[in-house]
Image (cartoon, rainbow, N blue to C red):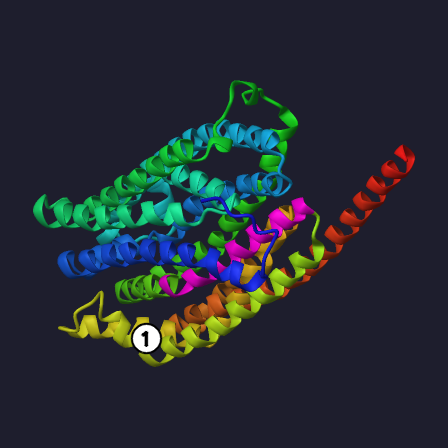
Amino acid sequence: MAKNMTEGAVLPLILRFSVPLLLGNLVQQTYNLIDAAIVGRTLGENALAAVGGSSSIQFLVIGLCIGLCIGFGVPVAQRFGAKDYSRMRSYIFHSYILSIVIMAVLTLATTIGCAGILHLLQTAESIFEDAYAYLFVIFMGIPFTITYNLTSSILRAVGDSKTPFMFLVISAILNVFLDLLFIIVFHWGVMGAALATILSQGVSGVSCLAYMYKKFDFLRIRKEDMVWIPRRAKKLLNMGVPMGLQFSITAIGSMVMQSANNALGAVQIAGFSVALRIKQFAMCPFDAFASAVSTLAGQNYGAGNAKRIKEGILKGSAVGVIYGILIGIILIAFGRDLSTIFIKENSETASAVLDASARFLFVAGFFYWALGILNTTRLAAQGLGFSNLAIFSGVTEMVARISVVVFFVPKYKFDAICFADPTAWVTGAIYSTIICIYAIRKVKETLKQKDKAQNAVKGNIA
């Protein structure tokens, strides 16, 4: 069901919109956790290291896809808020064409360069074959990734966050079933885990697309909408490319961090992989709150309500900080216990892996509050159309991570790796807050000028 976020109490709207997003993110991360748990407990530590050893490059490529799709949804949200449905459908049509081109280019480039990417990451020879098999299949599934993220972005732009969640639940259940079938019954190893992931995501993407066309008449592309207008394609790219690059630039710092960690040995790789799964699971609410605020900001920009935009950003950030403090305490206190989901403590090596994971989560737990500010302010600025400035948030994170790796990892080893993410989060939060304040001020000025122009026209008519 579409939801107008230009009316009603702001905080309840944000929370209601966030719940399906949060549950969807949790479901998605749950089946990622199940992937890792099945791989780690069935195939062993080396197979888990093979899956986790390429996570940063996955985030770079998949993050690019996700960022592009989120960006494509911004003009849709703005036109929906302004009740300009004809232009909204035109933007949807252009997003389809651009997405088809992007998925073809990315799939071809990544599958061809898969081996070179793993060598660049200093992937150990003992896990290289499995890492290649897993990553190659994930890259082959890029069209499914883009299909789901684009359709869910469009649905969220018009206020429907429940539908993508429902299909994601179905996808998650299917993923678990396929994991067990491909890994335990068919013995396809890590390739089976990757295949289960992309097939289940394909189901959720196609389901979202079919539902969108059947349920929402105002989202169906008409013949008159299928006219190529270069300036609209340019606007979509101006929104989507910076968002995609911001994800990718952030991932470059993570790649450098992972490459340095991979050079420390199999124990550190496996420990990092386990901690990464838990870290990503704990980060789900931040994305949900931030996406809700971004949609609210975009719709209210279209509706011309600057006061409501500011209120939404402040309240969304507060919710994010409170959650960050609470989840941080849990990670500090129970990080090692949570890590046993993936690794049985039945050997000296397994114990060392659990210790490494617990150390990483312990340090991260003290800084999760910063993500509440970082994600909300960054996505709010993007929702207001300032993607070109938001991209530098990713740059600040990248520089922070790389600086920790270059200056501290040689001496402090894995301990330095543990502080790379927190350093990036705090640095990114400072920058994103500054650009968000700037974006709000610019939006106020723009809306005031529009009001003056409209009043002048009314005066002339009178």
357 vs 7, left or right, is left
Front residue of this view, candidates 26 and 13: 13
Q: Is residue 284 left or right of residue 33?
A: right
Under mark 1, the amino acid is: Gly
Instruction: Kindly give the residue lying farthest to the front in the view shown.
Output: 462
Query: Residue 66's spot in the image, x, y percent?
Result: 46, 45
Magenta region includes residue 291: yes
In screen coordinates, is 410 left or right of 170?
right
Which residue is at 62% across, 23% downward?
A: 229
Q: Nearer the viewer, residue 439 or 354?
A: 439
Secondary structure mostly taken by the magenta-highlighted segment of the chain: helix
Query: Camera-side residue: 167 or 363?
Result: 167
Decide whether residue 7 is among the magenta residues. Answer: no
Quadrant of image for the N terminus = top left
Q: Position of residue 256 (x, y in %)?
A: 45, 56
- Tell me the residue at 67%/46% (across/down): 303
Q: Position of residue 354 (x, y in %)?
A: 26, 72
Q: Which residue is mark 1?
A: 335
- Tell me if 407 is positioned left or right of 208 in this view: right
The region drawn magenta spans: 281-303
Q: Quadrant of residue 134?
A: top left
Quarter of the image for the C terminus: give it. Answer: top right
